Amino acid sequence: MHAVSRTKNCTQRLRHLTLTSRHRTLQDAATELGVTWGTLNYQLKRIEEAAGFTIIDFGRTRPLTVTAAGRAFLNEATQLLTLLEDRSP
């Protein structure tokens, strides 16, 4: 998480990532977030690159699948976002 926290727009990307993990496809998540599929895909790849592992596996013919390492990462991201929201004025 430390390496990810140093990336550009970290908080927004983590919010997008946690929401994406609840969808069947990347396109469904992008539609809900009001961004393009390409934008969401770019954000996911940058987070995975910083983290050093695959968080969400996806393909053209199958639904999104959160990896085991991704599940632990998403739990930590959710906790972090909750703490940040609790501290917001």
Image (tube, helix red, strand yellow):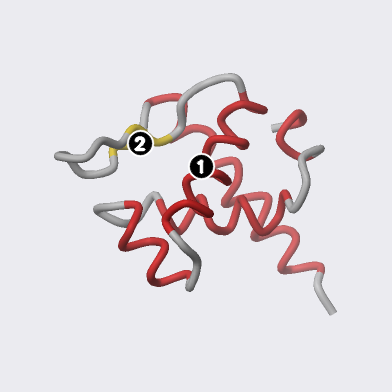
Image quarter of residue 51? top right
Mark count: 2
Image quarter of residue 61? top left
| Residue located beneath label 1 in the image | 74
In this rendering, the answer to whether 36 lies above or below 63 is: below
Contact, CB < 8 Å: mark 1 with mark 2? yes
- The image position of residue 34, as x and y in percent, is 48, 73
Q: 77 or 7, which is in the foreground?
A: 7
Q: 84 or 12, which is in the foreground?
A: 12
Label 2 element class:
strand
Q: Amino acid at mark 2?
A: Val
Label located before the other in sequence (1 or 2): 2
Point 28% across, 52% down: residue: 25
Point 72% across, 49% down: residue: 10
Tag 2: Cα neighbours inside 10 Å, few (<14), some, or many (≥20)?
some
Label 1 element class:
helix
Horizontal placement of 55 versus 4: left or right? left
In this rendering, the answer to whether 83 lies above or below 54 is: below
| Residue located beneath label 2 in the image | 66
Image quarter of residue 7? top right
Location of the C terminus (image quadrant)? bottom right
Location of the N terminus (image quadrant)? top right
Horizontal placement of 26 versus 13: left or right? left
